[in-house]
Image (cartoon, coloured by chain):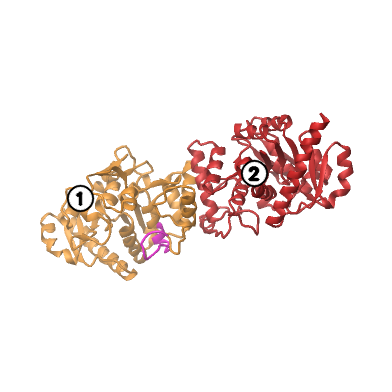
Chain colours: A red, B orange
Amino acid sequence: MRITLLAGGVGGAKLAEGLAAICPPENLSIIGNIADDEEFHGLWVSPDIDTLTYSLADMIDRKQGWGLADERHRVLAGLERLGCDTWMSLGDQDMATHIFRTQLRNQGVRPSAIAQTIAESLGVKAHILLPTDDPLQTRIKTEQGWLSFQEYFVRERCQPDVLDIRFKGAEESWPTPEAVQAIKNADLLLIAPSNPIVSIAPILAIPGIRQAVAETRAARVAVSPLIGGRTIKGPADRMLVASGFACNSLGVADSYAGLIDGLVIDDEDQAEREELEARGFQVLTTSTLMTCAEDKNRLAKDVLAFASTVGVEEAATC
Amino acid sequence: MRITLLAGGVGGAKLAEGLAAICPPENLSIIGNIADDEEFHGLWVSPDIDTLTYSLADMIDRKQGWGLADERHRVLAGLERLGCDTWMSLGDQDMATHIFRTQLRNQGVRPSAIAQTIAESLGVKAHILLPTDDPLQTRIKTEQGWLSFQEYFVRERCQPDVLDIRFKGAEESWPTPEAVQAIKNADLLLIAPSNPIVSIAPILAIPGIRQAVAETRAARVAVSPLIGGRTIKGPADRMLVASGFACNSLGVADSYAGLIDGLVIDDEDQAEREELEARGFQVLTTSTLMTCAEDKNRLAKDVLAFASTVGVEEAATC
């Protein structure tokens, strides 16, 4: 079974790990979010893609969920000594990734080919795909004005109220052929329990990706990032509200309107099941919290078992 | 007294430190060698300038004479994991300098302004000047073909026979106004005990620099890098021979023909004094070995005392 996963950073990487553990990883394609990318110190940093790569390479800092394990920050200290703004935490080993990526980008190599090369070099067998090779950036409007995602997320620690969110460059962007193929050829299209508004939406904002997801014959299942109507970490709950969606699994489903057939929600949110089903979604209720490898593998198994019924029931409906 | 020093890497940095210790550092200008610069991993590395800067900032690795003290190489290990050639040893803190320099170069800032910014950020009070902002690269012909300086020096460990040496870009290069002013306005122009062939010659190969040195009214004194006809470290002795000069202080003096008035040689080479004087050079014989701060300061004092007589005697001769 060919599985394609749309994923953001930490939550997406956790489900990707579960899937890679229980499926042949070469049948797993993960389309990551690049709208959080930003240049720091002249180096191109791609936080969500790196989180996916480092997680699947088993090199991730398990405690914080991002960055490499056993990091130091001596380069950053050196940059600070030279008067640079160093609010974006970049470890020394991680810096190698950014230096390598930037060099290849400046040589004209496609960003998606670079991501694949990095993943292969670190021993990742699943396919990490970029949704587009074009510039695409999440812009977040606050009372301070428009911020990049990292400025909002890291520098301002998600404190400012979010007044508006835009994906700069999305309308003009072309999908990568690899991402379109992975969506078209998938038996199962999954959306990870990532932030629907700033992790998944920018992927779906690329017209060619949105169209491929709308048209694929794959069963399409999203995993809600909410547990009891709240996120474990990060501002997804507040962002759902700021974007006009309900802060519950109904809001998550609405944010994917027309693009999913089934939704996996946490046991804590089972009260919403009936209304989801009334709206035409197939629903799996299970524990979606992933704190260890066993959690990830079990959720991946649950999702796959559920997804196989989504395909069947939908076929029966046709 | 305004002193301008032409200097290469390690030997040049040692005399620079001595001078900075005994003179008001704001009256000291050091024109460094940039023909050893090279791009590694997309980052612009300027080894001789960094050695000068780190030495004067008292951050140098005293044991090896270059690089920063207490370095680790985690970035380099990361780059190696990504399949990069990592024969050029670059420490983590050092990497910050290269990242910073590259970012500013890509923004169009003049390389000499960047060098000054780095030096100031690290607390260096002497003026570290670049001889040119134009591309200039030492090329070394060996039986393997033409190599860059770092390929010859670091990768090949100076093993191949040197068949020819060229300074690519020298003829078309313009001196920086700061370097020309520092030579013109100096009371004393010193040439450090650096490699005459690959550290000092590329500076003097810039037509505007050569002309300024030829025309300055400053007393001009070189310190021979040889002790007993040999170098402490590095291939200067073999390179003198390969370039058609004698491997002694006479050869060093010849390599600076028309550009120096006096020469400082080591006690071990005092047998050559008479012939140097016969050729019209004023000569100081002293211990030129610099292994500690006291050595550096003492040599700097000896050189300054000698240089003051060079100016006086020359004036008397006119």
Residue B256 in view of the camera: no
Q: Residues within 10 Å of mark 2 (few under 14, many from 20)?
A: many
Is residue A180 placed above or below A85 in the rendered structure?
above
- In the rendered image, which residue does mark 2 sit on? A36
Cβ–Cβ below 8 Å for labels 2 and 1?
no
> Helix, strand or loop at disc 2?
loop
Where is residue A220 drawn, in percent x and y?
75, 37
Where is residue A138 drawn, in percent x and y?
67, 41
- The residues colored magenta run B53-67
Quarter occupied by residue B290: bottom left
Identified by mark 1, the residue type is Ser
Q: Residues within 10 Å of mark 1 (few under 14, many from 20)?
A: many
Label 2 is found on which chain of the structure? A
Where is residue A239 drawn, in percent x and y?
77, 45
Q: Is residue A27 left or right of residue B77?
A: right
Q: Is residue A28 left or right of residue A228?
A: left
Residue B54 highlighted magenta (yes or no): yes
